[in-house]
């Protein structure tokens, strides 16, 4: 296996694997940790060697031009794509034959005195540099092989940057423009034709671009599958997916052209436009509203948050503490420490008790006038818990287990904090949400195959079953149980009326992920936290967008909405909680 694995990885680095060989390699990597470790070792060695050779090539060729280096001392190989590589015979014996070709190529350069254009030995003009990253970030080379990227990584025409599901990357273009790429994004550098500038192409995901002023005769051009943007100097967000492309402008103006029919529209600051993939509507620029102003910022407050029903208190939780704050002033009031991690928070209707639930099964009941809170471990059936949910009134708890166990327990919390098991529904589910309606508690959960089911939490009877394109990882039910909303990797953000069956997509898949969903108390508005640091709102009845809120954080992981709909709390980087006030 070791020899075959090495040969296949060699093929990846040389860009010569057949489709069958790609499948064979994928199976090896999927089934063996040792194989994956070997893959990363070889990829890292190849990247290090290429970087060393690029640095040495300039020095050696300069000395050759001055006749200070004999051809016999050269130990380089010239790859087919014009890249210089070291003779790495200790790792890849079959590459030794490339050294002779390298010697011949260098000799030609020496004999003709560098008459051949120097770019023949390089990748051409550097188009961008990766200056910061986190998570999995990859260089996709001209042979479409993935190479782990590092800070300072240059990019040339024909290459691309791929950001993983939890990654973030920031690029500086050759003209000084800045590009910030969100999770699950691919940004490609397309070679220029004639005297035109190279194009930047967003294949999928999200890009936040701050363009420097551009010469009128050579503007920055950014494309997606559906749109072409001509930029003279501005700041905007661009989203690309299979179903459409969306631009949101913060400063300046951009010419936004739909690729399918050439229709164009000028998008100005505070506007957005969408180019759809299918049958298209008229291309128009619409007003982009942000109806919130920042009121308070609480540093290192926690990664979960909840408002009391009267809006006077705010609760936060992190990995070991639960804190109580004055929601109006942002002043801390009380704290309990060393209580473990909690993933869901809710106040009792009286506003005098707080219930916290963790995915581990731990429950905290905190009567705010008591000296200390009560804690308990939910005694469940065998199997590992996956997700948990708590109703808005803090009375109902729901959990899902792993695939092997396949059950969904429902718990009730009484007025003094006693917890009892109400129902255990035998169903293999992952994402879950629960709400207390006038007809009793309703619970919804999603399966890996896209099946999503709504139950009566008291009787355990199934009320409705829906099928989506993919599993809904993030779920929410409105307070009356009528609106069901969820986000899945292939489904996007969908909302469904459980009475009429009407369904619509509010946000497409493949652009930027949704991390948290909350309905307003009256169910008329849906608010979503996004993985690119924005919060968005929609009217549930029409699907019309109500606002877009840039929070200033790279990612929004959680949020809470006050019952009156006028206060919003968002959780961002390093446990920072921001409190927002809705403008009239």
Image (cartoon, rainbow, N blue to C red):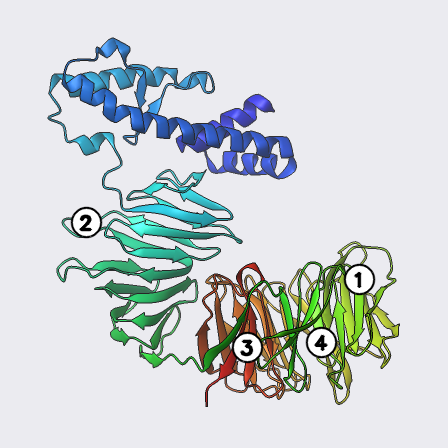
First in residue order: circle 3 vs circle 2? 2
Q: Which residue is mark 1?
A: 361
Where does label 3 land, which residue? 527
Residue 84 visible from this viewpoint: no
In front: mark 4 or mark 2?
Answer: 4
Which is more N-terminal, label 2 or label 1?
A: 2
Q: Earlier in the sequence, mark 4 or mark 1?
A: 4
Q: CA distance from mark 4 to mark 1?
A: 16 Å
Q: Report the residue at 20% width, 34% height from top.
A: 119
Residue 158 lies in quadrant: top left
Question: Tags 3 and 2 in contact by the CB under 8 Å rule?
Answer: no
Say whether marks 4 and 1 touch (CB < 8 Å).
Answer: no
When the figure is inspected, residue 65 is found, relative to residue 476, above or below; the finding is above
> Spatial distance from mark 3 to mark 2, Cα to Cα?
44 Å
The residue to which callout 4 is attached is 346
How far apart in space, not on screen, are marks 4 and 2 (Cα)? Answer: 59 Å
The first of marks 3 and 4 along the sequence is 4
Q: Earlier in the sequence, mark 4 or mark 2?
A: 2
Can residue 563 be seen?
yes
Could you tell me residue 215's position as x and y percent? 15, 59
Label 3 secondary element:
strand
């Amino acid at each position: 296996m070791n020899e075959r694995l090495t040969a296949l990885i060699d093929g990846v680095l040389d860009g010569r694997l057949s489709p069958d060989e790609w499948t064979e390699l994928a199976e090896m990597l999927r089934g063996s940790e040792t194989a994956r470790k070997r893959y990363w070792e070889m990829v890292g060695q190849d990247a290090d060697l290429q970087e060393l050779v690029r640095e040495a090539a300039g020095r050696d060729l300069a000395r050759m031009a001055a006749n200070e280096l004999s051809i016999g001392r050269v130990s380089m190989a010239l790859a087919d794509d014009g890249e210089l590589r070291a003779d790495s015979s200790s790792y890849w014996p079959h590459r030794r034959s490339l050294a002779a070709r390298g010697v011949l190529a260098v000799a030609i350069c020496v004999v003709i005195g560098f008459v051949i254009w120097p770019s023949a030995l390089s990748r051409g003009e550097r188009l961008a540099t990766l200056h910061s990253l986190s998570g999995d970030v990859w260089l996709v080379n001209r042979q479409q092989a993935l190479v782990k990227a590092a800070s300072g990584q240059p990019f040339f025409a024909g290459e691309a940057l791929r950001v993983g599901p939890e990654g973030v990357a920031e690029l500086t273009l050759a003209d000084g423009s800045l590009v910030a790429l969100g999770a699950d994004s691919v940004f490609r550098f397309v070679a220029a034709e004639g005297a035109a500038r190279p194009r930047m192409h967003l294949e999928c995901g999200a890009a936040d671009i701050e363009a420097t002023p551009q010469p009128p005769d050579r503007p920055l051009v950014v494309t997606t599958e559906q749109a072409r943007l001509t930029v003279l100097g501005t700041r905007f967000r661009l989203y690309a997916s299979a179903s459409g492309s969306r631009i949101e402008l913060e400063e300046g103006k951009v010419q936004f052209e739909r690729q399918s029919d050439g229709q164009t529209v000028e998008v100005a600051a505070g506007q957005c436009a969408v180019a759809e993939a299918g049958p298209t509507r008229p291309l128009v620029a619409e007003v982009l509203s942000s109806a919130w102003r920042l009121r308070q910022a609480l540093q290192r407050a926690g990664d979960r948050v909840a408002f009391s029903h009267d809006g006077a208190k705010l609760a936060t939780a992190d990995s070991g503490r639960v804190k109580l704050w004055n929601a109006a002033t942002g002043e801390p009031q009380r704290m309990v420490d060393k209580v473990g991690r909690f993933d869901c928070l809710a106040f009792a209707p009286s506003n005098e008790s707080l219930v916290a639930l963790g995915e581990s099964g731990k429950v905290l009941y905190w009567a705010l006038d008591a000296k200390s809170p009560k804690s308990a471990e939910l005694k469940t059936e065998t199997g590992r818990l996956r997700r948990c949910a708590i109703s808005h009134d803090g009375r109902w708890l729901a959990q899902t287990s792993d695939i092997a166990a396949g059950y969904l327990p429902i718990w009730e919390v009484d007025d003094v904090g006693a917890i009892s098991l109400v129902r255990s529904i035998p169903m293999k589910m992952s994402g879950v949400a629960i709400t207390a309606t006038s007809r009793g508690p309703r619970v919804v959960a999603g399966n890996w195959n896209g099946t999503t089911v709504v139950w009566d939490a008291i009787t355990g009877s199934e009320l409705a079953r829906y099928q989506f394109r993919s599993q809904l990882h993030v779920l929410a039910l409105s307070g009356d149980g009528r609106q069901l909303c969820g986000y899945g990797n292939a489904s996007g953000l969908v909302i469904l009326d459980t009475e009429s069956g009407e369904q619509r997509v509010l946000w497409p898949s493949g652009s930027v992920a949704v991390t948290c969903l909350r309905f307003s108390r009256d169910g008329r508005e849906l608010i979503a936290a996004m993985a690119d640091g924005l919060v968005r709102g929609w009217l549930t009845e029409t699907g019309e967008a109500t606002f877009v809120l840039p929070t200033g954080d790279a990612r929004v992981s959680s949020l809470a909405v006050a019952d009156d709909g006028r206060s919003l709390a968002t959780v961002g980087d390093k446990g920072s909680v921001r409190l927002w006030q809705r403008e009239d």
